[in-house]
Image (cartoon, helix red, strand yellow):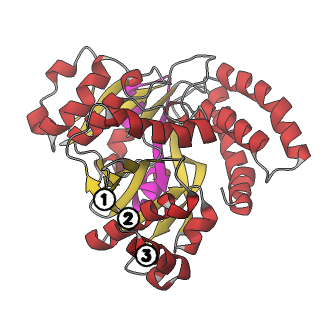
Amino acid sequence: MMFIQVFGKESITRLDWDSVKNGKVLRKYYEPLVKNSSKIFVRNSDHQVEILQVGTELYPLTIGRKSNKKTCYLFSLKAQYIDYTREEVLKGSSYNKSQKAIVKFFFPFLRVFGSWMGMERTVFVNNFFLATNLYEKDTLLSDTMVTQYLKEYYPNCVIAFRSINESTDSHLLNKLKLHGGLPLACRQLYILDPKHDNFQKKRPVIRDRKLWEKTKDLYWQKVLRFDKIEISTLLTFYRDLYLKKYSQLNPDYSADFLEASMNSKILDFYILREISSDVPLAVQAVERTKHVVCTPFIGYDHMKPKNIGLYRLMHLKLSEIAIEEDKIFNMSSGASTFKKQRGGVPCFDYHIIFIDHLPKRVQWFWKQLYSISESIIKPAMKNLKV
């Protein structure tokens, strides 16, 4: 029988790090979280973190916490589906007055109802505090014993597997659905397979490459160690984009997160610098599996002129990494027109939830949300390209 166990604050000392893949390295990431909380890595959160060991693999678990305060959407289905959606609709130009009125006045009641139905009692599986959490094709999470164990270990909580898409994660998606999981659509992302798509002949890609060739005073550096002073600048780049421009519900990462995710090799960081001054202009992290690459963390200097094309250069760099490593490029969500012009193919990303161990009234609530997801949310995402 496969070994399955959860390690929390009281039992973390019993985890045999030598018995798991890359255990000594991953320890640098996991131990601070379990001993403290998610707040040390994501400042706008405060959630209990535990570790699931399945055979020789480790997966982070985050435990939902009932609160009326708004928290980062990575830890809360209420924050993602109610708070974030409300913000997006009210701010967005793609929505009409009727849609905005419904969201403005109805969603606060939905938020209270969701809390009453225990929406926050959710355990997120494989939650690395990233918008996109990649899965290996041979992940042991697909085994039915894992979901059964989690339902028994957390009998009062929804069990949610974060960000599983229908393109690169189709095997895991189908397996979890077969085990009884409900797929809640959470976003539409874009996938580029350099082997199958003749994207390099697309005009925007050619223009991006020419832009880089004309850029003589910039270079990419893979970070081996963060400079303590410079890391503040890099976080400012990120926060200006994701927190100030978009939403305070996005993760507010700390310097500890950047250092731990790099030291544990969960992420590789690349900085775009000026040759003449060595000043950083942009930063992006690269997350990898055997088959896929993506970037869950980016930021750039918004004070620089737009004609420098920092975002275009960052995207080009990731495309080149995918080509060099012969991997699929998960472009994530957002900037739909930009990504489709550069070969991105849309597909849906899901949270797979397990609820059959919960009270009937709670199951009813989630089944209604699933029905809304299939009949309203997914068609809206397609039409609005979000």
Residue 168 placed where, x, y %? 42, 63
Q: Say what secondary structure mark 1 lies in.
A: strand
Q: Which image quadrant for residue 22?
A: top left
Give the number of callouts: 3
Q: On residue 209, which mark appears?
A: 3
Q: Quadrant of the N terminus?
A: top left
State yes or no: discs 2 and 1 in contact (Cβ < 8 Å).
Answer: yes
**Of 278 and 28, the residue lying toward us:** 278
Q: Tell me if I can see residue 181 in this picture.
A: no
| Separation of residues labelled 2 and 1 (CA atoms) | 9 Å
Q: Residue at x 81, y 37 (%)?
A: 103
Q: Which image quadrant for residue 34?
A: top left
Label 2 neighbour load within 10 Å: few <14, some 14-19, many 20+: some
Label 3 neighbour load within 10 Å: few <14, some 14-19, many 20+: some
State left or right for residue 332 relative to residue 254: right
State yes or no: discs 1 and 3 in contact (Cβ < 8 Å).
Answer: no
Q: Which residue is mark 2?
A: 317
The magenta-colored residue range is 148-176
Mark in front: 3 vs 2: 3
Amino acid type shown at disc 3: Arg
State left or right for residue 285 relative to residue 359: left
Q: Tell me if I can see residue 66 in this picture.
A: yes
Amino acid type shown at disc 1: Trp
Amino acid type shown at disc 2: Lys
Q: Earlier in the sequence, mark 3 or mark 2?
A: 3
Q: Which image quadrant for residue 313?
A: bottom left
| Separation of residues labelled 1 and 3 (CA atoms) | 14 Å
Q: Which residue is mark 1?
A: 220
Q: Say what secondary structure mark 3 lies in.
A: helix
Label 1 neighbour load within 10 Å: few <14, some 14-19, many 20+: some
Q: Say what secondary structure mark 2 lies in.
A: helix
State left or right for residue 244 relative to residue 194: right
